[in-house]
């Protein structure tokens, strides 16, 4: 999403449409970056093929089921997976990371832009040991939070959601994920977003590769200090994380045992409260489920972009992306590339809440889809 904010390609698809930017890469480096952009599309296809080996298709793979997965692996699929992984790993290490480093060098001022809340949260992912205690078990990406300059243990009970400035009725039944049942209200006074405002113990945090690497205390990211919480810091963290995951996958796929059971038998309880925490590509992903009479009565999800793109909370405190945007100088309001760079550094999933508004609240357009 972010490459064309720094790399100028020819005026043909897929390099247009785009915002015009102050392109700073030397011509030879820029040309290499253009070639890399096209090569990355091929690598993305191969990565989708790797997932499809286990999930049937990608995106929206279909193999995950309660208790495990439906696909029984065999040696041939392991071989095909490793074949593609080798090529992708080489691309990440030898092409993607060097280009990110070149862009970071040319746009070093962006290590001081888009600071945000400087708080981080990671649920952790890729367990390295058995057990149901997700928070405390050893994981490739550990669980944790970083708030007001201090590392702390993750406590899921501290997670809440607010709707003071969201287009939902204020009376949601509670602000805990297992309690809230929202009612839309598009005419709500002072509201300005369909996104709710998740908070951790009342604090604003960001999630994603930077948060994961900061909680991991990855040496190169931590060495940046507060500059890690920036436009370039997020791109840098995303690149080195991609390399770490690729190399780990080579070991993990070697541990797959063809023909062994892939799903644990289970029985749906009459009543229960469940919570699932993991890391999606964009950051901390949590699902909360309340079962009554063997049926789901409450199901809530707080997705990564909800954390990063949240509106103000009841205290009027802005979300981390809002904070990152404050004070940004925009040279041309009709070509706000400065804003775009900050927003895209978070890799937002805009399908979560698409809306448009003007500062004077003038109606741009209004429509309903049935």
Image (cartoon, grey):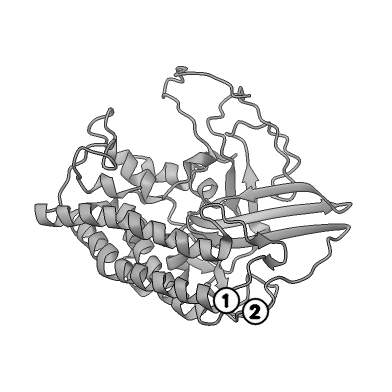
Residue 74 x/y as whole percent: 57, 76
Residue drawn where x is 47% and y is 81% of the image: 251
Where on the picture, by quarter, is residue 13?
top left
Nearest the eye: 32 or 352: 32
Going 51% across and 52% down the picture, which residue do you hit?
59
SS at mark 1? loop
Q: Nearer the viewer, residue 100 or 197?
A: 100
Check disc 1: other Cα within 10 Å, few if <14, some if 14-19, many if 20+: few
Give residue 64's position: percent from left, percent from top: 64, 61
Residue 362 in the image: x percent, y percent?
45, 17
For residue 242, the mark is none
Indicate the quadrant where residue 99 lies: bottom left
Residue farthest left in this picture: 27
Residue 216 in view in this figure:
yes
Q: Is residue 329 above or below residue 74?
A: above
Residue 226 in sight in this render: no
Q: Of callouts 2 and 1, which one flags the residue occurring earlier in the amino acid sequence? A: 1
Q: Which residue is mark 1?
A: 74
- Label 2 sits on residue: 259
Q: Residues within 10 Å of mark 2 (few under 14, many from 20)?
A: few
Who is closer to the viewer here, 146 or 232?
232
Q: Residue at x 51, y 48 (%)?
A: 305
Seen in the image, is 88 located left or right of residue 332? Answer: right
Mark 2–mark 1 CB contact (< 8 Å): yes
Secondary structure category for the residue under label 2: loop
Pinpoint residue 93: horizontal percent, then vertical percent: 30, 70
């Amino acid at each position: 999403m972010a490459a064309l904010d720094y790399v100028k390609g020819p005026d043909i698809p897929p390099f247009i449409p785009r915002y015009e930017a102050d392109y700073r890469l030397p011509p030879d480096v820029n040309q290499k970056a253009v070639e890399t952009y096209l090569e990355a599309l091929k690598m993305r296809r191969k990565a989708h093929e790797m997932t499809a080996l286990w999930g049937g298709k990608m995106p929206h793979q279909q193999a995950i089921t309660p208790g495990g997965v439906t696909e029984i692996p065999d040696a041939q699929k392991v071989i095909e997976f490793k074949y593609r992984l080798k090529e992708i790993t080489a691309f990440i290490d030898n092409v993607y990371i060097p280009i990110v480093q070149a862009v970071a060098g040319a746009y070093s001022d962006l290590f001081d832009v888009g600071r945000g809340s400087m708080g981080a949260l990671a649920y952790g992912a890729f367990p390295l040991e058995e057990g149901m205690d997700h928070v405390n078990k050893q994981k490739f990406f550990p669980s944790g939070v970083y708030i007001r300059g201090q590392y702390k243990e993750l406590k899921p009970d501290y997670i809440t959601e607010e709707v003071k400035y969201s287009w939902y009725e204020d009376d949601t039944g509670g602000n805990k994920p297992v309690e809230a049942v929202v009612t839309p209200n598009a005419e709500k006074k002072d509201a300005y977003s369909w996104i709710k405002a998740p908070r951790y113990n009342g604090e604003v945090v960001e999630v994603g590769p930077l948060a994961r690497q900061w909680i991991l205390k990855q040496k190169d990211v931590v060495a940046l200090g507060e500059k890690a919480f920036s436009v370039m810091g997020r791109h840098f963290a995303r690149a080195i994380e991609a390399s770490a995951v690729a190399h780990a996958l080579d070991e993990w796929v070697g541990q797959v045992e063809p023909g062994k059971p892939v799903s644990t038998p289970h029985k749906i309880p009459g009543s229960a409260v469940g919570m699932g925490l993991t890391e999606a590509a964009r950051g901390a992903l949590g699902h909360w489920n309340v079962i009554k009479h063997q049926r789901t009565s409450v199901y809530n999800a707080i997705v990564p972009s909800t954390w990063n793109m949240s509106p103000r909370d009841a205290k009027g405190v802005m979300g981390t992306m809002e904070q990152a945007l404050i004070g940004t100088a925009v040279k041309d309001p009709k070509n706000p590339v400065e804003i775009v760079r900050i927003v895209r550094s978070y890799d937002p999933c805009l399908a979560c809440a698409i809306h448009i508004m003007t500062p004077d609240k003038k109606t741009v357009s209004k429509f309903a889809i049935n």
